[in-house]
Amino acid sequence: QLQASGGGLVQAGGSLRLSCAASGFTFDDHAIGWFRQAPGKEREGVASINQYYGSILYADSVKGRFTISSDYAKNTAHLQMNNLKPEDTAVYYCAADVGPRTNTLEKDEYEYWGKGTEVTVSS
C-alpha cells in the first residue's frame, strides 16, 4: 500500500513537499512515480525515480521546478515542488511500477497506486 501526503493550499510561487510512504510493500528495484490529475483532465506523469538503477524522469512542465527523491531503504519517496503555478493544481498520487522496466512516466505501466493528496495553487 502506498500513501501520499503533504498536499495543501499555497500561493503561486510557493513550495510544497509531498511524501510517499509504503506499507506492506518494498521499493526494491521498482520505479516510483508521481502523477497528478486536475479536474476534467487525464492523469499525467510528473516525475519518476528508480533509485536502484539511478534513473530519474521529469515531465517537461515541471523540469527545473520539481525535484523527486527517494530512500529505498525506508521505502519512501518525495516530491519537492518549488515555484508552484496555478496550473499545478491537482490531486497528486504516488505509484509503483513492478514490471520489467527501469523507469517510465507512463501511468498505464504502474500497478500499485496510493490515495492522492490535493494540491491547490492560488494565483
Image (cartoon, grey):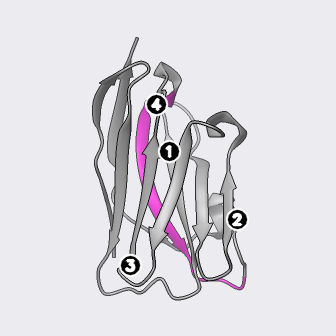
Dot in front, 1 or 4: 1
- Circles 4 and 3, Cβ within 8 Å, touching? The answer is no
Mark 2 is on which residue type? Thr
Q: How far across and how far down the image is residue 82, in percent?
A: 47, 34
Residue at point 32% right, 47% down? 117
Q: Dot 3, crowdedness within 10 Å: few (<14), some or many (≥20)?
A: some
Lower position in the chain sequence, tag 1 or tag 3: 1
- Tell me the distance, in whole angstroms, between the alpha carbons under discs 1 and 4: 10 Å
Q: Which mark is residue 104?
A: 2
Q: Which residues are magenta?
A: 88-100
- Which SS type dominates the magenta stretch? strand
Q: Is residue 17 visible?
A: yes
- Tell me the distance, in whole angstroms, between the alpha carbons under discs 2 and 3: 19 Å
Q: Dot 2, crowdedness within 10 Å: few (<14), some or many (≥20)?
A: many
- Tell me the distance, in whole angstroms, between the alpha carbons under discs 1 and 3: 21 Å
Q: How far across and how far down the image is residue 114, in percent?
A: 37, 64
Q: Which residue is label 3 attached to? A: 75
Q: How far across and how far down the image is residue 119, in percent?
A: 35, 35
- Circles 2 and 1, Cβ within 8 Å, touching? The answer is no
Lower position in the chain sequence, tag 4 or tag 3: 4
Q: Which mark is residue 39?
A: 4
Query: Which picture quadrant has residue 48?
Result: bottom right
Q: Which mark is residue 36?
A: 1
Q: Which mark is residue 96?
A: none
- Tell me the distance, in whole angstroms, between the alpha carbons under discs 2 and 1: 15 Å
Mark 1 element type? strand
